[in-house]
Image (tube, rainbow, N blue to C red):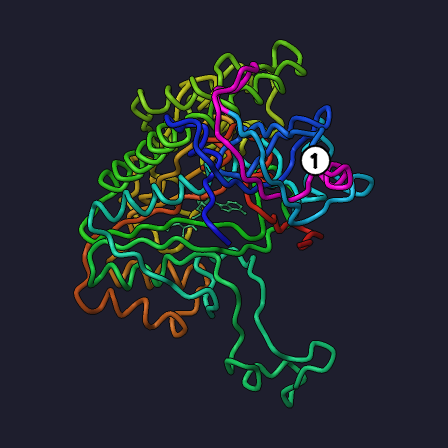
């Protein structure tokens, strides 16, 4: 197909008066003369100047918004405003026409809701170009961070028979004909005849298998899709999301928190550096959006400031019990402004409580530790009961402004007797998790890990408001389009 140069490289080119070939999609075509061309390498368009007097009019007509074209021409210094270089076309070929009557993306501002309905085309907008370049950098930075530290990237299974979090929110995996499932003598579904000979589901977390790896490789991480059949139609939940789950032998909860904080700062710093132009664009986008809001709902920091602030400050660390005391005494609680009043110790925090702590009280990222054991998963290490007999586990959740929980993790229960006792209490079948319990039988050691919700991270870094806008094709209740 011949040599072509990406637009990002051309716009930074120090050389002019050279012949170049560029390919991309037409954003706009003005006065039969100026094409704004974009190839996704940057949000900035390349201006193509067309010698319309010497160009076939039928070709000119085919240069429409959305069309794919190939251009050969001279890269020259631009006289016009808004760009330093442009391309004087000598040859234009339309590779793919785009009927302007039917093409849904017009050169104007579309609502995010509308763009979600045409998610197959929304990559072609400035906003989504920026989002997916940022997402790309964040994921590369995650790998780089762990690779530099000698962690092993472990691919844990997507199909599993366990529900690691025990929340019962799994999607079943079967190849049964659902209208005619084989039955046992007692009339139940006979899973022995199913593909795997047992009930299976899509994984909600790679942690349990990750722990097995850490018990030999010391430090591992997973980075893959996870699936939850939570029926939550919120701006923070997806049915299919990506999670990063490191698991480290010989780590306690403090080591675990340190690693998580370092990871978050590393990937944000990397992306600020690498995607400066995109973050600036997204910062402006958010400013525009905030202008539509009433004064008291606008945030006092720009996106760029928020990211920088997160890098410059230590995350606030406190226990769940301390957090409850703060919340009980808080103005919104006393004035009955919370939808869920904070009364006693032991209940889970609602996102309004998390956001109060982060956005109003501490005004920075917060790490909460040592949650009541009854609201956390079976595998977390049990603390000694406190003076009042309250039982907690070595859990940690990291809460971010505008997001709420971004990381959930814990030191793991490595003591076989304590773990088995907890599984019994919670009705988790020990026979099925025999392999997990084996790591507590053979060379058990203190270890810890966490899960970082990748889309929540992308939400934070892009300043977007809805998680459905930071994954290419979101899966949520009643939606699996594309
Ligand atoms: O807190 P969670 O449920 O923790 C675990 O799954 C542990 N096994 C992690 C570990 O210790 N290895 O989930 C971890 C993170 C949450 O903090 C959140 O960021 C994200 O995953 N998350 C979701 N993101 C999008 N949509 C959902 N439905 C999510 N559920 C959790
Ligand atoms: Mg959690």
Q: Position of residue 131 (x, y in %)?
A: 52, 36
Task: Identify the residue under disc 1.
Answer: 55
Q: Is residue 124 above or below residue 281?
A: below
Q: Is residue 151 left or right of residue 138?
A: left
* Identity of the residue furthest to the right in this view: 101
Residue 462 in the magenta stretch? The answer is no
* Range covered by the magenta-colored residues: 56-85
Q: Residue at x 32, y 71 (%)?
A: 435
Q: Residue at x 56, y 57 (%)?
A: 169
Residue 369 visible in the current orientation: yes
Residue 109 visible in the current orientation: no
* Identity of the residue furthest to the bottom in this view: 185
> Which secondary structure lies at badge 1?
loop
Q: Is residue 190 left or right of residue 309?
A: right
Q: Position of residue 35 (x, y in %)?
A: 64, 30
Q: Position of residue 237 (x, y in %)?
A: 57, 43
Nearest the eye: 157 or 438? 157
Q: Is residue 448 above or below residue 211?
A: above
* Identity of the residue furthest to the front in this view: 54
Q: Residue at x 64, y 30 (%)?
A: 50
Q: Is residue 133 above or below residue 245?
A: above
Residue 70 in the magenta stretch? The answer is yes
Nearest the eye: 29 or 264? 29
């Amino acid at each position: 197909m011949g040599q072509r140069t990406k637009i990002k490289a051309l716009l930074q080119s120090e050389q002019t008066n050279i012949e170049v070939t560029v390919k991309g999609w037409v954003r706009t075509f003005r006065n039969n003369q100026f094409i704004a061309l974009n190839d996704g390498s940057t949000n900035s368009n390349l201006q193509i100047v067309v010698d319309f007097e010497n160009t076939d009019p039928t070709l000119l007509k085919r240069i429409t918004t959305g069309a794919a074209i190939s251009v050969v021409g001279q890269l020259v210094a631009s006289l016009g405003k808004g760009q330093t270089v442009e391309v004087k076309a000598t040859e234009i070929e339309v590779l793919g026409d785009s009927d302007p009557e039917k093409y849904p993306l017009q050169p104007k501002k579309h609502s995010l809701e509308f763009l979600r309905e045409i998610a197959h085309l929304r990559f072609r907008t400035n906003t989504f170009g920026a989002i997916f370049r940022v997402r790309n950098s964040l994921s590369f930075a995650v790998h780089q961070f762990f690779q530099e530290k000698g962690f092993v990237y472990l691919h844990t299974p997507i199909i599993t028979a366990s529900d690691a979090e025990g929340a019962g929110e799994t999607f079943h995996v079967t190849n049964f004909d659902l209208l005619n499932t084989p039955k046992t003598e007692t009339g139940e579904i006979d899973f022995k005849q199913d593909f795997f000979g047992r009930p299976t589901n899509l994984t909600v977390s790679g942690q349990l298998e990750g722990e097995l790896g850490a018990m030999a490789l010391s430090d591992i991480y997973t980075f893959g899709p996870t699936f939850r059949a939570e029926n939550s139609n919120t701006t923070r939940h997806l049915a299919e999301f990506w999670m990063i789950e490191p698991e480290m032998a010989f780590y306690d909860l403090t080591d675990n928190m340190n690693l998580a904080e370092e990871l978050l700062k590393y990937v944000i710093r990397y992306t600020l550096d690498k995607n400066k132009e995109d973050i600036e664009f997204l910062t402006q986008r958010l400013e525009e959006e905030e202008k539509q809001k009433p004064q008291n709902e606008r945030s006092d920091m720009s996106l760029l400031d928020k990211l920088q602030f997160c890098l410059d400050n230590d995350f606030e660390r406190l226990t769940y019990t301390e957090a409850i005391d703060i919340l009980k005494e808080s103005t919104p609680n006393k004035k009955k402004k919370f939808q869920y009043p904070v009364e006693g110790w032991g209940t889970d925090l609602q996102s309004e409580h998390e956001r109060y702590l982060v956005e109003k009280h501490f005004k920075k990222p917060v790490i909460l530790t040592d949650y009541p054991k009854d609201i956390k998963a079976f595998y977390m290490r049990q603390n000694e009961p406190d003076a009042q007999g309250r039982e907690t586990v070595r859990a940690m959740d990291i809460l971010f402004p505008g997001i709420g929980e971004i990381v959930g993790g814990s030191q793991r229960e490595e003591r076989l007797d304590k773990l088995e006792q907890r599984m019994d209490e919670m009705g988790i079948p020990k026979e099925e998790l025999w392999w997990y319990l084996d790591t507590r039988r053979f060379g058990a050691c203190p270890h810890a890990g966490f899960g970082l919700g990748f889309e929540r991270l992308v939400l934070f870094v892009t300043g977007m408001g809805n998680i459905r806008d930071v994954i290419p094709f979101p899966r949520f209740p009643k939606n699996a389009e594309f």
